[in-house]
Amino acid sequence: MSDQEKIWDVVMIGAGPAALSAAIYTTREDISTLLLDKGPIGGLAAVTDWVDNYPGFPKGVAGLELSDLFQKHAERFGAQIEFGKVSTIVDEGTYKRAKADSGDFLARTVLIATGSDYKKIGVPGEKEYYARGVHYCATCDGAFYRDKRLVIIGGGNSAVQEALFLTRYASHIDMLVRSKISASDVLQRELAKNDKITVHLGTTTDEIVGDPPAGGGKVVKVIGTDTASGKKVEFPTDGVFVFVGLAPNTGFLKGLPIELDDIGFIKTDIGLQTGMPGVFAAGDVRSGATMQIASASGEGATAALMIRHYLENLERVA
């Protein structure tokens, strides 16, 4: 540590609802706070078309607007946000060093709130046609498919929500569901009423086919299997949206004394502290998270209080 190196009270990795909520609490108590995020600010909330279940918004709110309000609230009290992708955390005893592509950042405590990202299905063509017909965010890319045919892969809440959203643009949607629809009853009722969507239960996704990628080709069809008959089925399409769940953004923690569960989410104690003293976790990246914006925000507030308590103990020991 150089004499000129700034030491933050807390560096928060991520700038979604959990981190932004935590930052509101820490900065109000004059705990110097830096948030590092590779973007976008607000995490998955920022690319969610419409949020209907966040308290205080009885008419609902656009995900981007809610994220912007979170950011403005945190910055009002002095939280600083910088763009940077963190590659690891180094334990230097009293201090922790977050190493990012934008530089090193030293802090007394760290909050990991990196959230989750969209799961991939790992079939041929998925990687090759990413952003050229294969997508994971309806809000981001749906408008490219006005009056086009689409295939949606998945049958959970997010798949149904995004399918309903995409009917604003698409002329028709084929929804491929490996087993059965697992979305909530409310969403299933909405799905049943929409004549733009055809649901194909018991249908796997085996391959995404397109024109030669080297020539800038686009997706033209999806090949699957009807599990009841065992026969191959094909779905002509202009684009594919994959919604099969979320995977935690914890790859940068490899080799650290921070325990992960079988899926890769961070295990914490009751105070949201990880196995590395002074390093906390909150929100969708934490094992046991409910994957809701409201609960992520609540965990952020709890983490902030735990961080304050940890810092107070550091001062007493010093």
Image: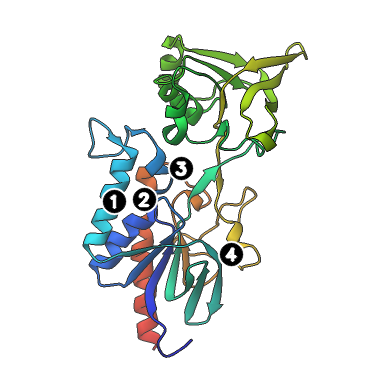
Q: Residue furthest right?
A: 230
Residue drawn at (35%, 85%), measured in percent from left and top? 316
First of labels 1, 3 by sequence position: 1
Q: Is residue 2 above or below residue 176?
A: below
Say whether marks 4 and 1 touch (CB < 8 Å).
no
Residue annotated with mark 4: 258
Q: Is residue 241 left or right of residue 255?
A: left
Residue annotated with mark 3: 290
Residue annotated with mark 2: 17
Residue annotated with mark 1: 70
First of labels 2, 1 by sequence position: 2
Q: Residues within 10 Å of mark 1 (few under 14, many from 20)?
A: many
Amino acid type, callout 2: Pro
Residue drawn at (59%, 19%), measured in percent from left and top? 237
What is the distance, in whole Å, between disc 2 and disc 1 at their CAs? 7 Å
Residue 90 placed where, x, y %?
56, 74
What is the distance, in whole Å, between disc 4 and disc 1 at their CAs? 28 Å
- Tell me which corner region of the image, top left, top right, bottom left or bottom right, holds residue 303: bottom left
Residue drawn at (62%, 68%), measured in percent from left and top? 256
Q: Quadrant of the C terminus?
A: bottom left
Residue 19 placed where, x, y %?
38, 57
First of labels 4, 1 by sequence position: 1
